[in-house]
Image (spheres, rainbow, N blue to C red):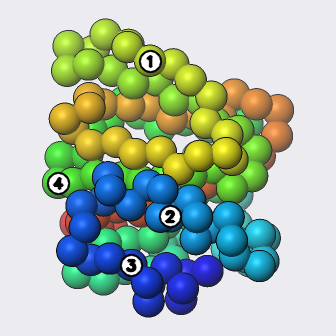
Amino acid sequence: MIEILRERWNRDAPLRDLVAWLKKEMDNYDNQEWWLPFVEFDPERYTRKVLYTEENMEFVLISWLPSQTTFIHGHPSGGCLFRVLYGELREDRFEQNDMVYENKAITTTNVNYIDDSMGFHRVYNISFQPCISFHVYSPPISQK
Ligand SMILES: [Fe+2]
């Protein structure tokens, strides 16, 4: 999966325009469990595994145990595409004044997108099972 995304990625397109394309590539991929070897749980906090990084983008797999959560955060240097591969997350979206304007389940159905023009967010696993999600950041956030 990573090789395919790396090869076919349209590096000229803004991240937000790649939502439908990414969903299609992932839905059409033969091995829907390609991510299994990269899963890593930590009872203390969710774990981020960088799967691929280059100058302007980064693929990250996040493994969540029940009750693990991010802080409320923005993406000041760019945007984030993300998709749940297994399980279910919840996402709160905040306006700049910290008021929640959206609270929704993030399921395996869709690819989601956020950048700071859409506000901040907090993502968490309140289900009773582990969750695995895939994230694309542009530019990469791990190198800082
Ligand atoms: Fe985020």
**Of the residues shown, which amino acid type is indicated by label 3?**
Trp
Examine the rendering and report whether any part of residue 131 can be seen.
no
Are the residues at dot 3 and dot 2 in contact (C-beta closer than 8 Å)? no
Q: Which residue is mark 3?
A: 9
Are there few (<14), some (14-19), or many (20+) residues within 10 Å of tag 1? few
Q: Residue at x 20, y 13 (%)?
A: 97
Find residue 22 and name its label.
2
Q: CA distance from mark 1 to mark 3?
A: 30 Å
Q: Residue at x 45, y 70 (%)?
A: 59
Residue 114 x, y percent position in the rendering: 34, 42
- Identify the element where label 3 is drawn: loop
Dividing the picture into quarters, in which one does residue 87 lie? top right
Q: Is mark 2 within 8 Å of ligand 1?
A: no
> Which of marks 3 and 1 precedes in the sequence?
3
**Of the residues shown, which amino acid type is indicated by label 2?**
Leu
Q: Which residue is mark 1?
A: 102
> Which of marks 1 and 2 precedes in the sequence?
2
> Which of marks 4 and 1 precedes in the sequence?
4
> Which of marks 2 and 4 precedes in the sequence?
2
- Identify the element where label 2 is drawn: helix
> Which of marks 2 and 3 precedes in the sequence?
3
Find residue 77 and name its label.
4
> Which of marks 4 and 3 precedes in the sequence?
3
**Of the residues shown, which amino acid type is indicated by label 4?**
Ser
Q: CA distance from mark 3 to mark 2?
A: 9 Å
**Of the residues shown, which amino acid type is indicated by label 1?**
Glu
Residue 74 x, y percent position in the rendering: 27, 38
Dividing the picture into quarters, in which one does residue 104 lie? top right
Q: CA distance from mark 1 to mark 4?
A: 22 Å
Residue 44 x, y percent position in the rendering: 62, 46
